[in-house]
Image: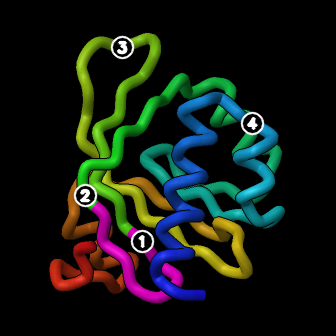
Amino acid sequence: MNVTETINIADGWVEKVNAKDIEGMLELSDHNIELMGPRGSAVGHDTLKQWAEESGIRLTTVTRYAKGDKVVFEQEGTWEDQNGQVTVFTFMEIKNGKVVRISRFDTLDDAFGDSGLKDEDKV
């Protein structure tokens, strides 16, 4: 898979989350997707579905970094029940056309450390 396909799948995943298209998001997610964030880690569609239904998150991608099957997105996140926005860094790993791992970080350095990407991978 090339970088363009990786970015397109990751962008599509974010679009499905923003649209609250749970089925569409699950179609782009591996059944054993790994989820890592500030509240710990989990695996699978059930947890992902619960997160998407309950989080009320909306993500706007500001900057993209990508190489191979990995992307890091700098994003502005807003939540339905909160005022303001927060900058988050989302790392996604794509395999066989599906998101197999997604991690949220508060800093770009942490996202780079986990993903192996770097400034030179900005697209």
Q: Quadrant of residue 21?
A: top right
Looking at the picture, tell me which residue is in the foreground, 8 or 80: 8
Q: Quadrant of the N terminus?
A: bottom right
* Circles 4, 2 touching at the beta carbon (< 8 Å): no
Give the dominant element type of the magenta stretch: helix, strand or loop.
Answer: strand
Q: Which circle, 3 or 1, is nearer the viewer?
A: 1
What label sits on residue 82 in the rendered view? 3
* Circles 2, 1 touching at the beta carbon (< 8 Å): no
Q: In the image, what residue type sits under mark 3?
A: Gln
Real-space Cα separation, disc 2 to disc 1, in angstroms: 10 Å
Q: Which circle, 3 or 4, is nearer the viewer?
A: 4
Q: Counting residues from the N terminus, which is met first, the one under dot 3 or under dot 1?
A: 1
Residue 95, image x, y percentages = 67, 80
Name the residue: 75% across, 44% down.
Answer: 24
Q: Quadrant of residue 65?
A: bottom left
What label sits on residue 63 in the rendered view? 2
Q: In the image, what residue type sits under mark 4?
A: Ile
Q: Which circle, 3 or 2, is nearer the viewer?
A: 2
Residue carrying label 4: 22
Residue 103, image x, y percentages = 48, 60
How crowded pointer 4 is (Cα within 10 Å; few <14, some 14-19, many 20+) is rated as: some
Q: Counting residues from the N terminus, which is met first, the one under dot 1 or under dot 4?
A: 4
Residue carrying label 1: 71
What are the residue bounds of the magenta stretch?
Answer: 64-71
